[in-house]
Amino acid sequence: MQKFNDYSFDDFLEDLSFIRFVKQGPQSHDDVWQQWVVSNPPNISIYSQARVYVLTAISINPISDTEGNKADVWAKINQRITRETKVITIRSRIKIWSYSAAAALLLFACGYWYVTSQITIQTGFGEQRTVTLPDNSIVKLNANSSLRYFRAWKWHGMREVWLNGEAYFKVQHLNKHPEQVKPAERFMAHAGDIQVQVLGTEFNIKNRRNHIIVSLMKGKIGIGTKQSAQLILQPGESVKYQDQKMIRTSITRMSNQPLAWTKNQMVVNGITVSGIIENYEDTYGGRIILEIPALGNKRIDGTISMISKDATLYMLANLLNGTVEQRGDNTYYIKQNHVK
């Protein structure tokens, strides 16, 4: 019974025995409430307000009480309504803020993905593919190659692509005043450690077997790495990058002409048989084994068809006076013919 002395307005309304006592009047099982009321507790006024509140709620007819008590009761009612309204408002605001924050976070995540994600285009063995970049530059991919560039192409400060394998580039010229080049007008092609920077030109990049060859057909390009100074190439020049060294040469002196692959050929000038085999394996996959390994050092001049894997295999066999035997799913053995 002593605990009732500490009851607040809300505590009375949450006590089922109090509500029953008010509704039913003094009963034998509620003597404790009757005894507590006649003891004139310190919070008797709050008890009276709670009693009127309950009677008002359950009665059809108005409840007689003092005007002051009624005013206090309605003040309590209004306080509860106001407090509950505030709670509902706060909860609503929290929900709205949570939804807004989640939407903003989702929007940021989508935006971040769009800006940083890249599109990758790949070719399989024996497959060539022509790609038109967002700036209308043309890239022709050789077999077994991949090209990457940013999905949000126009959002980045420079046109950039990343190449693994071999590709021929025809870069769209955007700049009309060479002396006033803007960052967005530059085109950067990355191949391993090499960076090829151009404005508008045509060139070939071969990035295979731990060395990179860049050959310029038209325009002017700069080639460099993060550690080395940039080399400027003129049309008809080529640079081979291997073991962190750059070697400049003329395209006409190359053992394999850089654009022959675009016509499904190899136009060779003193290339070794091993070099032909490497080009075959890079293009079609698989493996070629020579019965006599020393034949790999033999040098070949002329045009070799790369129209199909079979055509290349049998042309190579004829050059070596040999016969092709297939061993396994994708391994070929060139056996030397013995002349009687």
Image (cartoon, rainbow, N blue to C red):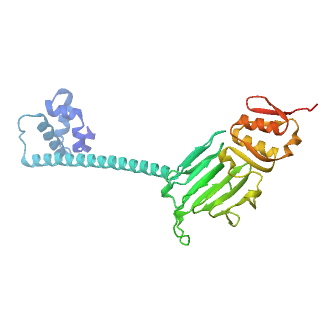
Q: Position of residue 290 (x, y in %)?
A: 84, 37
Q: Position of residue 328 (x, y in %)?
A: 76, 28
Residue at 69%, 57% in the rendered image: 215
Q: Nearer the viewer, residue 333 or 162?
A: 333
Residue 32 showing in the rendered view: no
Residue 253 showing in the rendered view: yes
Q: Position of residue 208 (x, y in %)?
A: 71, 48
Q: Vertically, is 246 above or below 258? A: below
Residue furthest right in the image: 340
* Number of marks drawn: 0
Residue furthest top in the image: 28
Picture quarter with the C terminus: top right
Q: Position of residue 233 (x, y in %)?
A: 68, 64
Q: Vertically, is 335 above or below 116? A: above
Residue at 22%, 39% in the rendered image: 12
22 with respect to 127 (left or right): left
Residue 14, quarter of the rendered image? top left
Picture quarter with the N terminus: top left
Q: Nearer the viewer, residue 154 or 78?
A: 154
Residue 3, quarter of the rendered image? top left
Residue at 77%, 33% in the rendered image: 331
Residue 62, quarter of the rendered image? top left
Q: Nearer the viewer, residue 157 or 122?
A: 122
